[in-house]
Image (cartoon, rainbow, N blue to C red):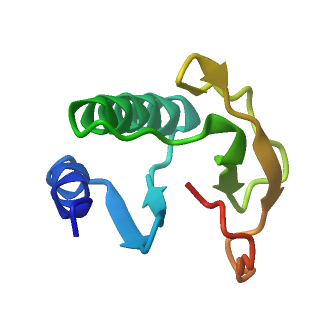
Amino acid sequence: MIADSLLKWLSKRGIYAQGYADDGVALVIGIVLSTVCEIMQRAVKGIEEWCTSHQLAVNPNKTEMVLFTRRYKIGQMTQITFYQQELTCVKGVLQRTFFISTNERLM
């Protein structure tokens, strides 16, 4: 229930976000990869600040990033940092593929 304010904050910035129990996901959609990365970096920074103000933390080691694209060749991705750690992008998948995770560490 406390994370509701974070979800609203992200939503006001055009970022689709969902949460369930202690898991969450943020989705940024765009055409230009560098712009998508900039928006996601701002979102991640906002999540850090929200967590600090609520005396909470997210473990960056349990945070994963997935790029969904139809492109065969993906340009250079701008690195996203979360709590001073660079996030790695797990293997990209085609947009038409369903992404299902049984892993409890989406965010």
Quick check: 7 left or right of 101?
A: left
Q: Residue at x 36, y 63 (%)?
A: 17
Query: Residue 97, position in %: x, y?
Result: 75, 80
Q: Percent position (x, y) of residue 80?
A: 58, 27
| Residue shown at 37% from the left, 28% from the top | 45
Q: Report which quarter residue 96 is drawn in.
A: bottom right
| Residue in front for this viewpoint, 43 or 33 | 43
Quadrant housing the C terminus: bottom right
Front-most of 61 and 56?
56
14 lies above or below 85? below
* Total numbered badges shown on the rendered structure: 0
Quarter of the image for residue 75 reads top right
Residue furthest out toward the top = 84
Question: Which quadrant, please, contains the N terminus?
Answer: bottom left
Instruction: Determine whether, in the image, residue 13 is placed left or right of residue 31.
Output: left
Q: Is residue 84 above or below residue 101?
A: above
Instruction: Give the x, y percent position of residue 13.
Output: 20, 46
Name the residue: 26% across, 37% down.
50
Q: Is residue 25 above or below residue 77?
A: below
What residue sits 68% from the left and 58% below the top? Answer: 69
- Residue furthest front as drawn: 55
Residue closer to the observer: 46 or 33: 46
Residue 21: horizontal and vertical position, in percent? 43, 74
